[in-house]
Image (spheres, rainbow, N blue to C red):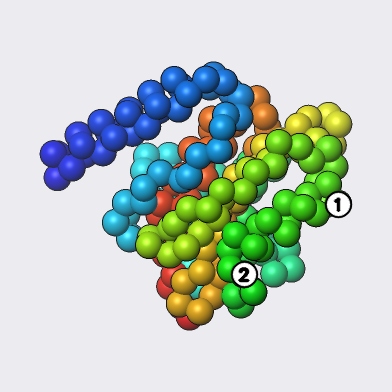
Amino acid sequence: LLVAAVAGAAVSAAVLMFHEHRGGGDDAPGAPSAPRTPGPTGTRAPSGYRTVRDPAGFALAVPDGFTRERQGERVFYLSAGGTFRLGIKISPPEPGGPAAVLERLAAEGADSNPGYRDGRVTETSHEKHPAALWEFTWNGYTAAEGPRHTYDLCWEEGGRMYDVWVSGPVGKVREAREHFDVAVDTFTVTAP
């Protein structure tokens, strides 16, 4: 167990060093990058997170203190004041798969995200399932709040389409990316 913990810490340190040396610094969105290679399904929540088993049919680790809120077909876990928003949507598959879905949403980005910019969709995989990652920056919910950066991973699994995203202030993009990586790495389906 100690060996696994030390190995996990080494991998985390390597990932952080990689992100720091890509350019753009700690608090600036960088070039698109696929989510980290996920750990084994059912990985325990890291320190500062707790695992939730959501009634919508999934489980994942969310930061301590985040609260659940249902908004239509989406489930959100929100930090105090909504600084960070972790969203999950489960739906039937759509024609063209995850990449086509996110490309369409990216093309319509300015319609639902005022000040939409720096949008890019990258094909990737999640747990060996075809997936797509969409990253973008936008003006945020209010002028006082300021610009936000969003990470969104969409994939198909077991006849369903899963979409997990995190948005946070541009000045806290590294923390938002950590929340995103933990959510994606620990996400498991609990019901069909």
Q: Residue at x 14, y 39 (%)?
A: 2
Residue 72 position, x and y percent, is 74, 68
Pick whichever, 33 or 170, lies toward us.
Answer: 33
Residue 148 position, x and y percent, is 71, 36
- Tell me, yes or no, if residue 166 can be seen here: no
**Disc 1: CA contacts within 10 A as few (<14), some (14-19) or many (>=20):** few
Is 172 situated above or below 67?
above
Q: Residue at x 37, y 62 (%)?
A: 128
- 20 vs 6, left or right, is right
> Which residue is under mark 2?
96
- How many numbered marks, from 0 up? 2
Of the 4 image quadrants, the one containing the N terminus is: top left
Is 165 situated above or below 17?
below
- Name the amino acid, label 2: Gly
Q: Residue at x 33, y 28 (%)?
A: 13
Is 55 situated above or below 174?
below
- Name the amino acid, label 1: Asp
Residue 180 position, x and y percent, is 52, 45
- 2 vs 90, left or right, is left
Residue 46 position, x and y percent, is 36, 43
> Which residue is under mark 1?
111
- 41 vs 61, left or right, is left
